Amino acid sequence: MSWLQRALELAERGRETTYPNPVVGAVLVRADAVVGEGWHERRGEAHAEVIALHAAGDRARGATLYVTLEPCNHHSLTPPCVDAVIEAGVSKVVVGALDPNPRMAGGSDRLRAAGIEVELVDSFEARRQNEAWRTWVGLARPFVTYKVAISVDGRVVVPGRRWVTGEASRRCVHELRAASDAVAVGMGTVRADDPRLDARDADARRQPRRLAFGRGPLPEGSELELRSGDLRDELAILASEGVQSLLLEGGPTLATSFLAEDLVDKLRVFVAPVLAGDGPHLLADLGAPIDLHRLSAAKVGDDVLLEGYVNAP
């Protein structure tokens, strides 16, 4: 295991507690031995680098710091991490990914100016680890994932069946909802299914906000929030309210609208082993091809989950 990989693993320990901050891990290595480790645990508390430096003590002098995100260069709830790194006498810093937040960026330049060697790995894994946060701070909108279940022939409905995919895929969807700040459908889906959009049978620390994009009215008793404005404007408002990740579960009309506006970052397509033979397709006419990046496939029960990025983090 590389030291940066170890730092990525440490960062995940803060997954449920750092919001709205990113997850960050740090490892200090001297003479091929770990002398300090840390991860950002909670907003307002010490960052990963500072925790690792405290664990190392005097052994940090001359050591190499591996950190998943560029050390911050701004005084907010805590002092800049670059100051602590410089003061500790670290000789080299290996950075997994640059900080996209203009208020916090510039740490690498400060370290170099202080005579510390800086190596930028620009790791996709490090960027992916905070993909929602990176889009939120960099583009001032939520990171949007379009989730859809389809047949092998690309239909979103299988005649005579309530569900397209199997139980394992449906359980996975509830886990995706639990990990998202908001979940959304279009009004066509609302009128057809009146969905709840909550996370059930999943270890959810909180329920996501549940949204409906389009013109109302919502059905009587619906607990969804209606968002009727321009998509970009609505996403900007959601971002200002702290929504970093949006799971889009709407039908072809809403998905096509988001894709046409370049507002989808990732696709998760659950493919069931069935030919539907009839029914609406995955998308309407886009007008032009959209390339996907870093496409992967995984078995989920009897189904296959295809994942790809439209806009990589």
Image (cartoon, rainbow, N blue to C red):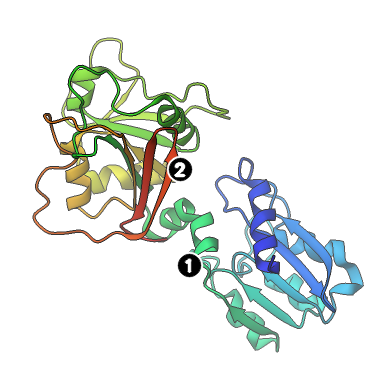
Residue depicted at x 31% and y 20%: 195
Mark positioned earlier in the residue sequence (1 or 2): 1
| Residues at marks 1 and 2 touching, judged by CB atoms closer than 8 Å | no
Residue depicted at x 58% and y 28%: 203
Res 183 seen here: yes
Q: Is residue 84 above or below residue 190?
A: below
Residue depicted at x 25% and y 18%: 161
**Looking at this view, is 289 or 209 the one in front?**
289
Residue placed farthest to the right in the image? 58
**Looking at this view, is 286 or 208 the one in front?**
286
User: Where is residue 76 shown, x and y percent of the image?
Assistant: 62, 58
85 left or right, relative to 113: right
Residue 47 found in image quarter:
bottom right
The quadrant the C terminus occupies is bottom left
Q: Is residue 47 above or below residue 230?
A: below
Q: Identify residue type, mark 1.
A: Pro
**Mark 1 sits on what residue?**
102
258 left or right, relative to 114: left
Disc 1 and disc 2: Cα gap in Å?
Answer: 18 Å
Q: Identify residue type, mark 2.
A: Gly
Residue 5 found in image quarter:
bottom right
Label placed on residue 242? 2
User: Where is residue 163 shown, x and y percent of the image?
Assistant: 30, 22
